[in-house]
Image: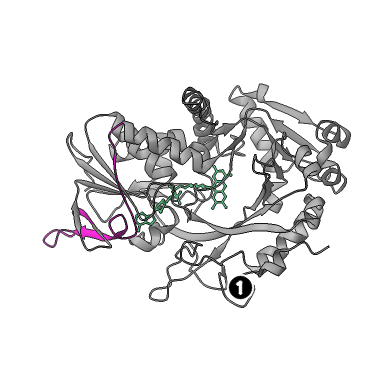
């Protein structure tokens, strides 16, 4: 039976990304645990999902009120982090640029309708500005003239949303953890979790972890916050699946850059297309990503479990050719100016998908002292400042709406990692990586 840690307990957290750091910080504030974070890479790990130039921060969550509320709670913390940064003469981590949420052909879809309704009912209606005609959108955002002409001609702006510089956010929270006394062990040998160290006489008790260098590290509680790697590190009984998703960078010319710097994050009928993009950042980079249901899998030879394949071990990897072709076709309609731009950098970024798109933050049912803090399903970054407090509730056995929603699911339904259901990364059926030449502008 799961037993919350007693005062004085040593808690090992595996993974120093968004979920792991946030948990470490929340635990350390209590001043009653010894908290140690292990990561296989220096933090921020270059291939972690949380390592990126930007991620969208929005509380527009359709009818998913739990995540809307949690992101609303995170907003004041994002602003507080900016104040902490300003006090140290650092750049802000959160940019409240607004988020422009576009419908299609004069209609909002259920996602947009439900989001606006839920936001208003929560008392945040002041954040919504509707742009109900093509003219209204183009007047405010002339850079989207072609987008509007191509059908994305109704929109609303959530004025409180925006984007975070996620790698900088990770660095910021890492610094806060260090100040609160969290200890870090990082590196490909000493920081890399190999397997659980389980008591031979009582296989439900975790004694600690064993790292790649062969050393054993004792702990009273182990928290697996290892993102998309989690399902390949411990048996999570098909609750989680690592899936890869396409990220692309463009470098617009100087005049385009100027028009696309001071603008909101945009989502183009996202429930249907999956495409969203960011303002051009201070390094002149325009990032566009594709959030789609299935993603790519990368089955491990020994057991078929999908395991992230990243540029840390495969530095020449780009994005799969079918993902590139899909993006070029979709963006020719959504943001036609990109057709004339080379893709200057691309990457497959990994979600830890749960069976229902909700987080999996729960005691592991096979152990007395193991917590899984994963299943981000591609939408956890925006909650980084507060997610750790909710994960701490799970660790301490506190009952809440969150702990109940994120509990171990009764009937896992994750589809097997077969080529029939998910495209396989690196295979010749469309999962092969695009060449540099193919990433160039085609027109
Ligand atoms: C393409 C893409 C776009 C996204 N866009 C958004 C967005 O716009 N807004 C949003 O809110 N969210 C977004 N997300 C989701 C967000 O990035 C994740 O929800 C969040 O990063 C999850 O954090 P995590 O800590 O679970 O995983 P990660 O950030 O991946 O961290 C996992 C950590 O575990 C470490 N680790 C792995 N294996 C081991 C091991 N064996 N030993 C030790 N350490 C290990 C890794 O090195 C890493 O540091 C996006 C994700 C992707 C992939």
Element under disc 1: loop
- Magenta range: 180-209
Q: Residue furthest left?
A: 201
Which residue matches tag 1?
432
Residue 393 seen anywhere in this rendered image of the structure: no
Horizontal side of residue 130 vs 214, given as left or right: right
Q: Is residue 102 above or below residue 129?
A: below
Q: Can you give x and y, in whole percent of width and height, for residue 90 in the image?
A: 51, 30
Horizontal side of residue 206 vs 79, given as left or right: left
Q: Can you give x and y, in whole percent of width and height, for residue 163 in the image?
A: 60, 37
Residue under the image location 77 percent in, 56 percent down: 341
Q: Is residue 240 above or below residue 314?
A: above
Query: Is residue 121 covered in magenta?
Result: no
The quarter of the displayed image where residue 259 is located: top right
| Number of disc labels | 1
User: Mark 1 Cα within 10 Å, few/some/many (few <14, many 20+)?
Assistant: some
Horizontal side of residue 118 vs 156, given as left or right: left
Q: Can you give x and y, in whole percent of width and height, for residue 283 in the image?
A: 64, 43
* Viewer-side residue, 110 vs 38: 38
Residue under the image location 48 percent in, 68 percent down: 416
Q: How is the image coloured?
A: one colour
Horizontal side of residue 170 vs 272, given as left or right: left
Q: Can you give x and y, in whole percent of width and height, for residue 214 in the image?
A: 22, 63
The CB of the residue at mark 1 lies under 8 Å from ligand 1: no
Query: Is residue 206 covered in magenta?
Result: yes
Q: Is residue 220 above or below residue 65?
A: below
Residue 211 seen anywhere in this rendered image of the structure: yes
* Viewer-side residue, 214 vs 154: 214
Q: Is residue 137 above or below residue 196?
A: above
């Amino acid at each position: 039976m799961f037993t919350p840690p007693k005062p004085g307990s040593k808690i090992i957290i595996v993974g120093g990304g968004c979920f792991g750091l946030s948990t470490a910080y929340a635990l350390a504030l209590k001043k009653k645990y010894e908290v140690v974070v292990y990561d296989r890479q220096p933090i921020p790990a270059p291939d972690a999902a949380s390592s990126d130039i930007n991620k969208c921060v929005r509380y527009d969550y359709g009818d998913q009120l739990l995540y809307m509320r949690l992101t609303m709670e995170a907003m004041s913390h994002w602003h507080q982090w900016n104040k902490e940064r300003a006090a140290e003469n650092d750049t802000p981590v959160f940019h409240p640029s607004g988020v422009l949420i576009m419908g299609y052909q004069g209609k909002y879809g259920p996602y947009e309708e439900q989001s606006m309704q839920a936001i208003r009912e929560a008392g945040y209606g002041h954040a919504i500005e509707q742009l109900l005609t093509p003219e209204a959108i183009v007047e405010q955002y002339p850079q989207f003239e072609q987008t509007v002409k191509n059908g994305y001609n109704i929109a609303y702006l959530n004025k409180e949303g925006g984007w975070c510089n996620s790698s900088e956010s990770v660095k910021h929270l890492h610094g806060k953890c260090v100040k609160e006394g969290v200890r870090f062990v990082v590196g490909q040998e000493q920081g890399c979790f190999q397997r659980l160290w389980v008591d031979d006489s009582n296989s439900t008790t975790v004694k600690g972890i064993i790292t790649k260098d062969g050393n054993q590290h004792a702990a009273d509680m182990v928290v697996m916050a290892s993102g998309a790697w989690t399902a390949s590190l411990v048996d999570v009984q098909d609750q989680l699946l690592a899936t890869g998703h396409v990220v692309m960078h463009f470098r617009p010319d100087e005049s385009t850059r100027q028009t696309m710097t001071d603008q909101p994050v945009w989502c183009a009928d996202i429930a249907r297309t999956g495409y969203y993009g960011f303002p051009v950042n201070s390094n002149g980079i325009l990032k566009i990503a594709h959030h789609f249901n299935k993603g790519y899998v990368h089955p491990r030879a020994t057991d078929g479990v999908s395991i992230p394949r990243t540029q840390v071990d495969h530095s020449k990897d780009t994005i799969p050719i079918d993902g590139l072709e899909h993006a070029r076709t979709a963006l020719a309609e959504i943001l036609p100016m990109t057709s004339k731009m080379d893709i200057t950098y691309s990457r497959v970024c990994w979600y830890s998908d749960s069976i229902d798109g909700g987080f999996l933050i729960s005691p592991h049912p096979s152990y007395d002292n193991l917590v899984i803090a994963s299943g981000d399903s591609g939408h956890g970054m925006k909650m980084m400042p507060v997610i750790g407090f909710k994960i701490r509730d799970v660790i301490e056995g506190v009952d809440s709406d969150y702990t109940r929603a994120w509990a171990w699911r009764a009937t896992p339904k994750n589809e097997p990692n077969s080529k029939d259901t998910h495209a396989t990364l690196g295979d010749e059926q469309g999962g092969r990586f695009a060449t540099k030449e193919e990433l160039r502008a085609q027109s």
